[in-house]
């Protein structure tokens, strides 16, 4: 059965209405741009989901040991200062920043840009679109971002005040100093 959706790109939608749209359609993966454009994303492929679990799992284990913050998977949405509502594939927020939010703020799309974000390129993603999203995260307060491209076996490292760094076929990537001691092993992500 085919369900016809209205052209959501023409809608300007408030935070509250976007929240209601997401709650009413939990099977959809939605984001909203700073201009209010609603983006419907396809579900991740099985191999992309497995790779994403590997990234989030390693980040979670590191955070469990250090207790320095809060880790989020790709289902978490954040309202960025520019008004966009984004769901990075994996994210981390320093404990002091997360704890400064009220319970009510934490229970919805939190009005906060994560300190660290990861986007994992899938086969259906245009590289330029994800690069634009990474730049948006930095412009809105992210302190470190990794765009991982398993197809090209590259990792793009985004940091404010630094030139974009591209690593070709690295075995590991270090999160220092934002994530002290965190080293992502890429063998389960690139293979």
Image (tube, grey):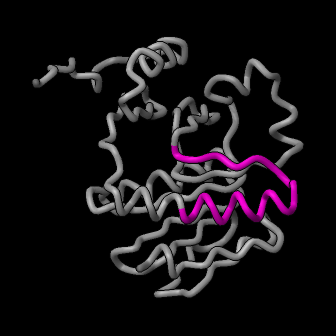
Image quarter for residue 96? top right
Residue 160 falls inside the magenta stretch: no
Q: Nearer the viewer, residue 29 or 161?
A: 29
Residues drawn in magenta: 54-74
Quadrant occupied by the N terminus? top left
Q: Main secondary structure of the magenta part?
A: helix
* Residue 156 versus residue 116 in the image, above or below: below
Left/right placement of residue 80 relative to residue 41 reads: right
Q: Position of residue 110 (x, y in %)?
A: 67, 30
**Residue sitting at 64 percent across and 74 percent down?**
184
**Residue sitting at 83 percent across and 41 percent down?**
97
Residue 73 falls inside the magenta stretch: yes
* Residue 33 versus residue 68 in the image, above or below: above
**Residue sitting at 44 percent across and 78 percent down?**
190
Count the marks: 0
Left/right placement of residue 119 relative to residue 113 reads: left
* Residue 22 versus residue 179 in the image, above or below: above
**Residue sitting at 61 percent across and 55 percent down?**
117
Quadrant occupied by the C terminus? bottom left
Image quarter for residue 31? top left
Left/right placement of residue 33 relative to residue 92 reads: left
Q: Position of residue 58 (x, y in %)?
A: 65, 66
Image quarter for residue 63? bottom right
């Amino acid at each position: 059965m085919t369900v016809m959706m209205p052209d959501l790109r023409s809608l300007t939608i408030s935070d509250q209405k976007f929240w209601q749209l997401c709650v009413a359609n939990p099977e959809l993966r939605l984001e909203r741009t700073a201009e209010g454009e609603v983006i419907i994303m396809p579900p991740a492929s099985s191999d992309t989901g497995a790779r994403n679990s590997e990234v989030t799992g390693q980040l979670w284990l590191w955070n469990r040991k250090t207790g320095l913050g809060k880790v989020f998977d790709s289902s978490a949405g954040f309202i960025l200062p520019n008004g966009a509502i984004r769901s990075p594939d994996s994210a981390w927020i320093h404990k002091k920043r997360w704890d400064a939010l009220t319970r009510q703020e934490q229970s919805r799309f939190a009005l906060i840009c994560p300190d660290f974000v990861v986007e994992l390129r899938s086969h259906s993603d245009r590289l330029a679109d994800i690069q634009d999203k990474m730049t948006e995260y930095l412009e809105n307060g992210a302190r470190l971002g990794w765009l991982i491209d398993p197809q090209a076996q590259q990792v793009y490292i985004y940091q404010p005040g630094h030139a974009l760094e591209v690593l070709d076929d690295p075995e590991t990537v270090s999160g220092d100093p934002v994530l002290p001691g965190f080293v992502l092993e890429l063998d389960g992500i690139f293979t």
